[in-house]
Amino acid sequence: GENVEQHPSTLSVQEGDSAVIKCTYSDSASNYFPWYKQELGKRPQLIIDIRSNVGEKKDQRIAVTLNKTAKHFSLHITETQPEDSAVYFCAVHSGGYQKVTFGTGTKLQVIP
Amino acid sequence: NAGVTQTPKFQVLKTGQSMTLQCAQDMNHNSMYWYRQDPGMGLRLIYYSASEGTTDKGEVPNGYNVSRLNKREFSLRLESAAPSQTSVYFCASSMTSQHGNEQFFGPGTRLTVL
């Protein structure tokens, strides 16, 4: 089955700095790569996603990059703010909806 | 629209008891999922349903059963609860696509098995 590794497990940054979280996967047929943000006690919510035919996608301060050859993708958050503090999960979809594997999460702390 | 709803929010069971977690969505999604979330382990897929009338096992199906009652509702049953099933359970739904789509999650059920 799919193997997804997410690093780092915790990340502390000063407000205004950038944060980068990386996920690697094993199945070269994987085709959809979403990132979810989960605030304490809340449900996960999608913040950005990328499909296998695209190398980079941006949405304001958030971007995702995908390297299909190396089988890794990364979440980039610029100009971090205290409200960015949360746990972030990557996910990998292989063969469509029936194979969804999540990373183990990264707890991001933005220090004011 | 309520999105994805789950009941109950909290539940405490004794070992061996049974219970059913309920999930419903009003977004006309075909696909529905059940996950469990444990500290340090992310979200692990228990069962999913690609459409009404179909269900399939995910990564950790042992000890669970599911029913896709209709397009809106997808329930998860624990027949004989064990302490290892203490977790937070999330239901999710999405549009069906062979390429994958955003999943919308319910608020979760926090289950403790003593």
Image (tube, rainbow, N blue to C red):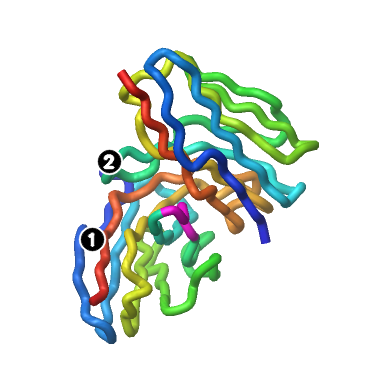
Give the labeled residue for mark 2. Answer: B1
Q: Which mark is residue B7?
A: 1
Q: Is residue B85 left or right of residue B50?
A: left
The three-letter amino acid code for the residue at tag 1 is: Thr
Q: Is residue B9 above or below residue B28?
A: below
- Judging depth in this view, the residue of A75 and B90 nearest the camera is A75
Give the mark nearer the N terminus: 2 vs 1.
Answer: 2
Quarter of the figure that contains the C terminus of chain A: top left
The three-letter amino acid code for the residue at tag 2 is: Asn
Q: CA distance from mark 2 to mark 1?
A: 17 Å
Residue A47 position, x and y percent, is: 45, 31
Task: Return the residue found at the far right.
Answer: A69
User: For the magenta stretch, what is the residue range?
Assistant: B40-44
Label 1 sits on a secondary structure element that is: strand
Question: In the rendered image, is residue B54 in sight?
Answer: no
- Judging depth in this view, the residue of A112 and B94 nearest the camera is A112
Q: Residue at x 65, y 54 (%)?
A: A3
